[in-house]
Amino acid sequence: MKLQGNDDSFQGSQGRAYLFNSVVNVGCGPAEERVLLTGLHAVADIYCECCKTTLGWKYEHAFESSQKYKEGKFIIELAHMIKENGWD
C-alpha cells in the first residue's frame, strides 16, 4: 500500500484514518452517497479479502470541487492497521 504523504488528518467512523492511492487484498462493495465531514461523496466500503472485515471506504465521486482529489483513493482506519517494521 502507498500512503499519501501527510494525510493523517482524515477521520473514519472509528477514529483516525489515512488516505491511500492504492491498496492490495481489498474488496469493494457497492457505491452509495454519504454525507461525510467534508460534504457529500459517493463512497464504497472496502474490506479485507481474507477475513471480510470492513477497513474503510473508497471515494468514487466527490460532489464538492475542493474534494475531487480524493476520487479513486481509499480511506483505511488506523484501528484496522497492523503495526510492522516500527512505523507509528
Image (cartoon, rainbow, N blue to C red):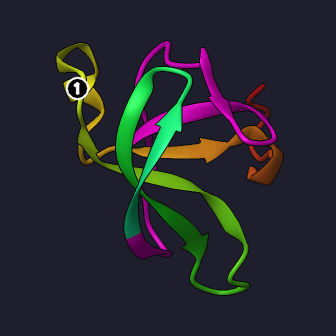
Q: Is residue 22 visible?
A: no
Residue 12 placement: quadrant? top right
Q: Position of residue 6 (x, y in %)?
A: 49, 12
How crowded is the residue under tag 1: few (<14 C-alpha within 10 Å), some, or many (20+)? Answer: few
Q: Is residue 4 visible?
A: yes
Q: Is residue 9 left or right of residue 35?
A: right
Q: Position of residue 56 (x, y in %)?
A: 60, 53
Q: Residue furthest bottom?
A: 50
The residue depicted at 53 percent of the width and 32 percent of the height is 36
Q: Nearer the viewer, residue 78 or 67?
A: 67
Q: Nearer the viewer, residue 61 or 81?
A: 61
Residue 31 vertical position relative to residue 42 in the rendered view, above or below = below
* Residue position for label 1: 69
14 in the magenta segment? yes
Residue 39 vertical position relative to residue 62 in the rendered view, above or below = above
Q: Nearer the viewer, residue 71 or 84?
A: 71
Residue 15 vertical position relative to residue 76 in the rendered view, above or below = above
The residue depicted at 60 percent of the width and 14 percent of the height is 9
Q: Position of residue 7 (x, y in %)?
A: 50, 18
The residue depicted at 42 percent of the width and 25 percent of the height is 39
Range covered by the magenta-colored residues: 1-30
Residue 20 placement: quadrant? top left
Q: Position of residue 21 (x, y in %)?
A: 33, 42
Label 1 sits on what residue type?
Answer: Tyr
